């Protein structure tokens, strides 16, 4: 894949069988083997998920249905190491006691991904999941069997609505910086939807304010997914306070990508997270104890979901 310096808004639907790629590939970090390993080892096994040592740090037990409950979890121990490509799986549902799903409603998993310079993840397929690539620094280079060559960075977001099937590859060049990003997996409402890809510039961020980046189809976010999840990010300076994004009757999952924050009386550090249930009309404050980069997901826990994705089951 050659570098594409011409960024453009892209929403491409797939209407025909994908062409075979003729470009030779050298395996540097095999996504195919990573995905195979996940599918045979991690994803079908609830025992794997249940063994993750999540720690609930609630200060008081739930008392009423309307009171917000903040469930917190430390950095995940569920990971895959493919050498130059490393991934850590954050499962939002595992922060909640007695929750029988590793995901939470339509949000299946939030994957912290690392790619060293000069890493190639060879062409592989996703099905029945919505995959969002959020890159706060560095670049992630994408090509696919539809002929797209795209660069995702801090100014662009990519959503791959895999539907009935979408093949793609990811790469960093030797001259690229080390990449740390989030790959977010959303469960669609229906199986075997039309596959498509979205790649667009995103609004410039405002310090100490949430930026809305994707949401359900028909909403006001610049990109969309096919279920009830809204996604926001925020750069929060030390000492600054914001309220957690909320929707009526929805819950919020908060993840600390960088820094440390106080969420009401709970403390979250680097890569720690919180699932906030029953927000209602209450403002939940987040105060940064150091310069921080946060992401938040507003989730409809009652949304219909499917659980047959390649990774995001």
Image (cartoon, rainbow, N blue to C red):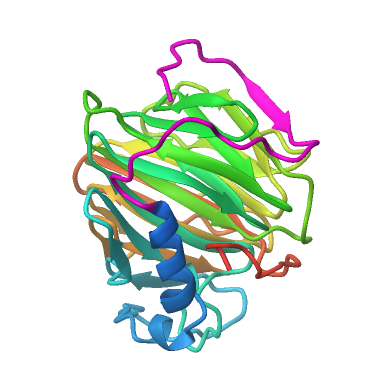
Q: Quadrant of residue 269?
A: bottom left
Residue 231: % across, % down: 55, 45
Residue, x 42% and y 80% (percent of image)? 49
Q: Is residue 21 above or below residue 71?
A: above
Residue, x 59% and y 53% (percent of image)? 126
Q: Hey, which residue is sitting farthest top in the picture?
A: 6
Residue 141: % across, % down: 42, 30
Residue 97 in sight in this render: yes
| Residue nearest the observer in this picture, 111 or 122 | 122
Q: Is residue 25 magenta-colored?
A: yes
- Magenta stretch: dominant secondary structure: loop
Residue, x 71% and y 68% (percent of image)? 306
Q: Is residue 260 above or below residue 19?
A: below
Residue 43: % across, % down: 49, 74
Q: Is residue 196 left or right of residue 177?
A: right
| Residue nearest the observer in this picture, 182 or 98 | 182
Q: Which residues are magenta?
A: 1-30
Q: Is residue 218 left or right of residue 66?
A: right
Q: Quadrant of the C terminus?
A: bottom right
| Residue nearest the observer in this picture, 271 or 15 | 15
């Amino acid at each position: 894949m050659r570098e594409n310096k011409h960024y453009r808004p892209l929403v491409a639907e797939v209407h025909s069988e994908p062409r075979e790629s003729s470009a030779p590939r050298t395996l540097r970090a095999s996504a195919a083997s990573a995905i195979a390993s996940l599918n045979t080892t991690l994803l079908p096994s609830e025992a794997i998920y249940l063994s993750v040592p999540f720690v609930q740090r609630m200060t008081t037990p739930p008392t009423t249905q309307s009171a917000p409950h903040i469930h917190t979890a430390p950095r995940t121990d569920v990971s895959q190491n493919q050498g130059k490509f490393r991934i850590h799986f954050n499962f939002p549902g595992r922060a909640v006691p007695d929750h029988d799903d590793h995901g939470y409603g339509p949000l299946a998993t939030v994957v912290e991904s690392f790619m060293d310079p000069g890493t190639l993840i060879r062409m592989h397929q996703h099905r029945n999941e919505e995959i969002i690539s959020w890159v706060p620094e560095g670049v992630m280079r994408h090509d696919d069997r539809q002929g797209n060559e795209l660069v995702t960075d801090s100014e662009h977001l990519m959503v791959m609505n895999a539907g009935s099937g979408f093949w793609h590859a990811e790469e960093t060049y030797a001259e690229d910086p080390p990449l740390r990003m989030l790959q977010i997996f959303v469960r669609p409402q229906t199986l075997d939807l039309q596959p498509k890809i979205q790649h667009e510039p995103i609004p410039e961020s405002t310090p100490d304010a949430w930026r809305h980046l994707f949401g359900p189809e028909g909403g006001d976010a610049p990109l969309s997914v096919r279920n009830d999840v809204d996604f926001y990010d925020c750069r929060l300076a030390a000492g600054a306070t914001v309220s957690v994004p909320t929707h009526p009757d929805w819950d919020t999952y908060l993840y600390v990508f960088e820094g440390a924050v106080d969420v009401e009386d709970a403390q979250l550090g680097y890569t720690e997270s919180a699932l906030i249930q029953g927000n209602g009309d209450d403002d939940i404050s987040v105060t940064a104890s150091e310069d921080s980069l946060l992401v938040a997901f507003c989730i409809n826990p009652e949304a219909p979901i499917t659980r047959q994705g390649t990774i995001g089951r």
